[in-house]
Amino acid sequence: MRYPKLRELKEAIISLISKPYTTKFPKGEFKPFPGYRGKPVVDEDNCVGCETCANVCPPGAITFEDDTNTGIRTITRNYGQCIFCGKCEEHCITGKGVKLSDEIFDLACFDRNEVIEKQERELLICENCGAIITTKDHIRFIHEKLGPKAYSSVLNLNMLNERLQLVRNEDAQLKIKDDLKRKDMFNILCPNCNRKIQCKILK
């Protein structure tokens, strides 16, 4: 017959004489420990809708749906599928777009639709082929990060003009009617269409 070790006896005695550790939630205040991972809360002012959080979300709780007709990207966050791993906070390009909160027990509900949140961001669409470039908030964030270097891109110049209204949009941009020409480089184009124009200029 094997006898228990002294360490096991010590743990058993401590368990007998100590009180059980339970929280008083929801009757009492819930005080999380440092590093507690609760509900990811989105900061509307710092989320640019860049799809990074959706790409790194292990359970696929974050999804994106783009509508080229309305020019709107809809971001859906299903906290019923969230495993609170913190990858969305860790990989957020702005560092402020999403933060883990102390809220987790309050997410319990009878209707799963109550834990689904949606956001909308305006898309930036290529005027030639209709391809989705990214969101306008994403481009503005990149522009601020690059500083003066951002002015080397015509796309950033168009976004700057839209914000400052230095020139009317109908005067600054020409509608593309047939094929891409050199003048079309001043329009909002995706990287593929812009590359075609640059190759024509080099020829």
Image (cartoon, grey):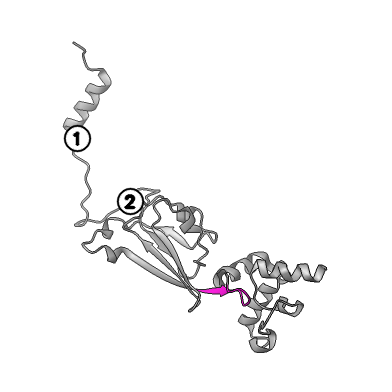
- Is residue 148 visible to us here? no
Could you tell me which quadrant the N terminus lies in?
A: top left
Question: In which quarter of the view is residue 131 placed?
Answer: bottom right
Pointer 1: residues within 10 angstroms few (<14), some, or many (20+)?
Answer: few
The x and y percentages for residue 197 are: 74, 71
Q: Amino acid at mark 1?
A: Ser
Region rendered in magenta: 122-130
Instruction: Please indicate whether residue 180 sits to the left or right of residue 90 in the image.
Output: right
Real-space Cα separation, disc 2 to disc 1, in angstroms:
22 Å
Instruction: Please indicate whether residue 181 sits to the left or right of residue 83 in the image.
Output: right
Between 31 and 53, the one lying in front of the other is 53
For mark 2, what is the residue? 32
Between 153 and 32, the one lying in front of the other is 153
Residue at left offset 39%, top offset 48%? 34
For mark 1, what is the residue? 18
Residue at left offset 46%, top offset 70%? 44
- 141 falls in the magenta region: no
